[in-house]
Image (spheres, rainbow, N blue to C red):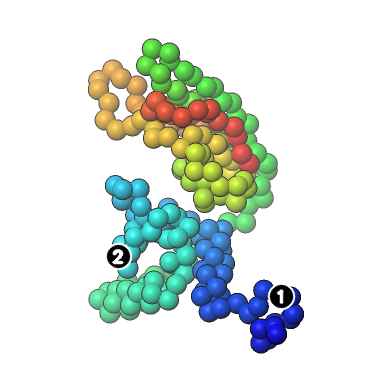
Amino acid sequence: MSDHGSKPGSAGVATGGQTNVDRRERLRRLALETIDLSKDPYFMRNHLGSYECRLCLTVHTNEGNYLAHTQGKKHQQNLAKRAARDAAENPQVAVSNRRKVLPRKNLVKIGRPGYRVTKQYCKETNHRSLLVQVDYPEIEEGTRPRHRFMSSYEQKVEPWDKRYQYLVCAAEPYETIAFKVPNVEVEGGDTKAGEEKKPFFHWEPDRKTYLIQLHFKPRGEGLVRPEG
């Protein structure tokens, strides 16, 4: 006899546990496609390589699990409690935030900017570096390009690959472009007198060229290919 509510030969009715697993997976995929973790004030990566929610004080093994957690009942309830507490402590700030509406720009994109990529390798130190030059001849007057690093899990163009990250460059009215680089720590921090600043970001307003110089700590293979 077949299970109640299912057709003969089928796998039967899904249990409550299976339904919850499917639901969490759908929420995780939706969150990965719509949420930018760099803007989440409660997202933190600890020294063990795990991910923590500062709001709920929970630990997660990867970004997907953290994002699924943010869509759950516990996190949403804590967000509501935090918002209510902030509104009670700072009523004027809460009102001004609700009223503040940023004007939306309706700019017509004029295509991708031109770019040049130069890979460099020092045999003596086993260091790899990357020089990126992006041309923005029609950039808006008085503005300069922006950049940020984006994890493989944030983008939706390629399958996720934890070995790589993306260097994203944007400037109106051009389309945003990204360069696929190894997910390796980039050298930076304080430099001694006479040493080259690492990493190096420089906007040349006369030539309308954005220069980016990255130095990778010894590790990994391959360097870059641009992504749209």
- Left/right of residue 31 with respect to residue 159 in the rendered view: left
Residue 142: image x %, image y %? 49, 42
Drawn side of residue 92 relative to residue 3, left or right: left
Q: Which mark is residue 105?
A: none
Secondary structure found at label 2: loop
The residue beneath circle 1 is 10
Q: Which residue is mark 2?
A: 57
Looking at numbered disc 2 in the image, what kind of residue is underneath it? Leu
**Picture quarter containing residue 22?**
bottom right
Q: Position of residue 139 (x, y in %)?
A: 57, 39
Say if 80 sits above or below 209 in the image: below
Q: CA distance from mark 1 to mark 2?
A: 42 Å
Q: Residue at x 33, y 32 (%)?
A: 188
Mark nearer the N terminus (1 vs 2): 1
Q: Nearer the viewer, residue 208 or 200?
A: 200
Q: Are marks 1 and 2 in contact (CB under 8 Å)?
A: no
The residue at the point 47 percent across, 65 percent down is 68
Give the residue at x 74% y 80%.
8
Residue type at mark 1 is Ser
In this orientation, does residue 215 appear? yes
What secondary structure is marked by label 1? loop
Residue positioned 44% across, 72% down in the render: 72
Label 2 CA crowd tier, 10 Å (few <14, some 14–19, many 20+) = few
Closer to the camera: disc 1 or disc 2?
1
Establish if 218 lies above or below 42. Answer: above
Q: Is residue 75 above or below residue 28?
A: below
- Asked which quadrant contains residue 78, the reply is bottom left
Report how many numbered discs are placed on residues in the image.
2
Of residues 166 and 213, the one drawn nearer to the viewer in this rendering: 166
- Image location of residue 120, percent across then percent down: 49, 19
Nearest the eye: 65 or 104: 65
